[in-house]
């Protein structure tokens, strides 16, 4: 049992920011895992992503580079061609002008419309799985923490 906990702790630690690297697999796994758990599951990004990040952003399909730039307050980021894509979300972590980005396929995770184009401060980047208003599928919604709209 203690060996398993040690392996788990090492695995989680190895997915953290080290010397400027960022490993998005843990973020993707946490978000898709919450979706699989179903309605009521909560996922917080506070312990995920690059070390000491301060802001988190989620952008949906067809978001322009200019819209992302306004939120991220820099032009130094990959936009993943999001302006002409509907198959992915773009997620960004920010710290003191540094930006780390990743994409998530919409086939794995669905964010509620009111989550997109917002800035979440560390401590507020928490999402809850709920049923869409139509009741047809699950989506990740803001868990109630304040978030600044920026697009």
Image (cartoon, rainbow, N blue to C red):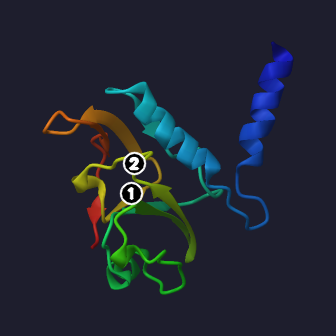
What residue sits 67% from the left and 56% below the top? 23
Compared with residue 82, is residue 118 higher up or lower down, i.e. above or below?
above
Q: Position of residue 87 (x, y in %)?
A: 39, 61
Q: Secondary structure at mark 1?
A: strand
* Inter-mark Cα distance, 2 to 1: 6 Å
Pick the front one: 128 or 79:
79
What residue sits 45% from the left and 60% below the top? 56
* Horizontal side, residue 24 vs residue 119: left or right: right
Q: Position of residue 99 (x, y in %)?
A: 56, 72
Residue 142 badge = none
Res 136 seen here: yes
Compared with residue 5, is residue 92 higher up or lower down, i.e. above or below?
below
Q: Which residue is mark 2?
A: 124
Circle 1 Cα neighbour tier, 10 Å, few/some/many (<14 / 14–19 / ≥20): many
What residue sits 33% from the left and 34% below the top? 129
Q: Position of residue 9 (x, y in %)?
A: 76, 33
* Horizontal side, residue 125 vs residue 132: left or right: right
- Disc 2 + disc 1, Cβ < 8 Å: yes
Compared with residue 122, is residue 12 higher up or lower down, i.e. above or below?
above
Q: Secondary structure at mark 2?
A: loop
- Kindly indicate the quadrant of the structure image that contains residue 58: bottom left
Q: How many marks?
A: 2
In what quadrant of the picture does the C terminus appear? Answer: bottom left
Q: Residue furthest right?
A: 3
Q: Which residue is mark 1?
A: 120
What residue sits 83% from the left and 16% below the top? 2
Pick the front one: 22 or 87:
87
Q: Residue furthest top?
A: 1
Circle 2 Cα neighbour tier, 10 Å, few/some/many (<14 / 14–19 / ≥20): some
Res 142 seen here: no
* Horizontal side, residue 134 vs residue 62: left or right: left
Q: Position of residue 1 (x, y in %)?
A: 81, 12
């Amino acid at each position: 049992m203690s060996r398993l906990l040690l392996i788990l702790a090492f695995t989680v630690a190895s997915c953290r920011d080290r010397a400027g690297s960022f490993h998005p697999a843990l973020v993707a796994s946490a978000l898709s895992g919450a979706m699989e758990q179903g309605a009521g599951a909560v996922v917080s990004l506070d312990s995920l992503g690059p070390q000491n990040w301060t802001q988190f952003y989620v952008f949906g399909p067809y978001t322009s580079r200019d819209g992302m730039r306004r939120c991220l307050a820099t032009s130094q980021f990959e936009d993943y061609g999001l302006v002409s894509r509907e198959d992915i979300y773009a997620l960004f972590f920010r710290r003191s002008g540094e930006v780390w980005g990743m994409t998530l396929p919409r086939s794995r995770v669905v964010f509620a419309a009111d989550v997109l184009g917002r800035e979440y401060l560390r401590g507020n980047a928490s999402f809850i799985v709920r049923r869409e208003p139509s009741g047809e599928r699950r989506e990740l919604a803001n868990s109630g923490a304040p978030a600044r709209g920026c697009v």
